[in-house]
Amino acid sequence: MRISVIGCGYLGAVHAAAMASLGHEVVGIDVDQAKIDALNTGFASIYEPGLDELLQEGLKSGKLKFTTDFSEARGAKAHFIGVGTPQRKDGAGADLTYLNSALNSLLPYLSADDVVIGKSTVPVGTAQALSQQESFQATGATLAWNPEFLREGHAIADTVTPDRLVYGLPADPAQADLARKVMDEIYAAILDRQTPQIVTDYPTAELVKVSANAFLATKISFINAVAQVADAAGANVTELADAIGLDDRIGRKFLNAGVGFGGGCLPKDIRAFKARAAELGVTDVIDLMTTVDEINLHQRQSIIDQVKQLLPEVEGKKVAVLGLAFKPESDDLRDSPALDVATRLSDAGYQVVAIDPKAGDKAQQLYPGLVLAADWEDALADADVALLLTEWKQFTTAQPPQAKTGAVVIDGRNSLDRESWLAQGWAYQGVGRR
Ligand SMILES: NC(=O)c1ccc[n+]([C@@H]2O[C@H](COP(=O)([O-])OP(=O)(O)OC[C@H]3O[C@@H](n4cnc5c(N)ncnc54)[C@H](O)[C@@H]3O)[C@@H](O)[C@H]2O)c1
């Protein structure tokens, strides 16, 4: 099938390349010329494992191309929209400017039997509002919402072998039938593997995505709240998580205490959920998400407070920051707890030296004053405090160098091998397991 993918960032670039790998003829469209140029060379400007290889395969086969020219969407039967929906600058809600603008740019090239498929994460009610816009209705095209659940670092596998496919369909039976048929055809190879499919209406599909992220965020903040009690009471939160995680009603995933969640999704999605609930006059979600957000931000502050407690004299004190990306196997720095802690400690006057396998240069572009270490040894040499803030395997498996006298490592992800750090003379502090 001929497909266009509008918005070629972390979601869209992967979706475009993955759809081409399923045999479709795909054009990816974005307003960012530099991003498009990079994608067309087969080397994305973002880091996602396996993406460059998939891009190169698609470009070589002639099934995949990228452009800034929306007219290239003409003739495609399905148009995925994966543009950003960041937090508004003036509040907690989602900024839908990019979504509205992408749809407006696409309108002149839509035909009556086309299906526009929203993938961006949006506040509940968005699809209904978009589908009712006069300009959209005038095209005769159909709108569906098909939320995306990929995890950065695993995005390709999550796109081609997802846990489930969710279709949010319009109320009109003929349009719903068309949208379903088109998506079934696009995802035929995925559906053949008995992937669960949930076919529902717009608001349910939109809320499935938002509530999935709200639940994951709540799970992380829950274990972080418990970690605070474990610290105060001398318990070990990792052993506790292992024990409660064996109960399959609870599950072990997302129960890792630490510096908290970040990235381009969870923080803005829980805030947008809160804002939308407020518009709908529903209060409990506001209170719940406010608490989840507060606990999460408290974890960052707690690491900063520990450093200040260990090093009350700022002058000449070196803090090694291990990790800057919001999670391993990604270079995404959006709302990264690691970058936040690093820059705040630097602003407080500490000599911060950071290292990250993929996000270092991007972090330095954002914060030109940020000092990057040449390598692992350089980062840790003469450090007074070392902070593990992103659990890259390179860091959690590396042998630490000998510690300077009195040096402390704070394991902000509870992922280091405590014994090997102790053996090299470091004092060790974890989260909820000091
Ligand atoms: N990144 C993830 O892990 C992930 C997972 C699931 C859902 N999502 C959702 O997907 C959406 C996109 O997220 P992302 O992480 O890919 O963001 P991103 O910032 O990496 O990519 C968004 C892209 O949209 C482009 N864009 C902006 N305005 C445009 C326009 N008018 N026309 C065409 N392109 C335009 C930008 O240039 C950018 O390349 C968001 O709603 C996000 O919540 C993201």
Image: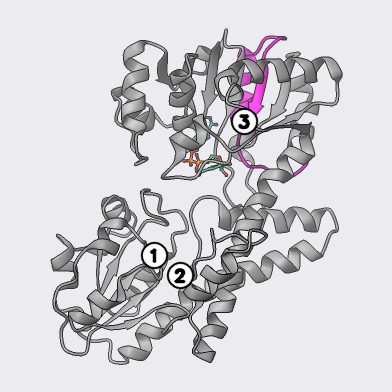
Q: Amino acid at mark 3?
A: Thr
Please say whether residue 141 is visible from this viewpoint.
no
Residue drawn at the location 62% of the way across and 52% of the way down: 213
* Mark-to-mark CA distance, 2 and 3: 34 Å
* Mark-to-mark CA distance, 3 and 1: 35 Å
Image coordinates of residue 156 in percent, x first then y, are: 44, 34
Badge 2: residue crowd in 10 Å (few <14, some 14–19, many ≥20): many
Please say which color scheme the image uses.
one colour
Drawn side of residue 315 relative to residue 366, left or right: left
Q: Nearer the viewer, residue 119 or 368?
A: 119
Q: Secondary structure at mark 1?
A: helix
Report the disc number at residue 195. Answer: 3
Q: Vertical placement of 311 versus 165: above or below?
A: below
Q: Secondary structure at mark 2?
A: loop
Queried whether the magenta region covers residue 235, the answer comes back as no
Name the residue beneath numbered marker 2: 259
Queried whether the magenta region covers residue 103, the answer comes back as yes
Name the residue beneath numbered marker 1: 338
State which quarter of the image contains the N terminus: top right
Q: Vertical placement of 113 versus 37: above or below?
A: above
Drawn side of residue 14 relative to residue 222, left or right: left
Q: Nearer the viewer, residue 322 or 232?
A: 232
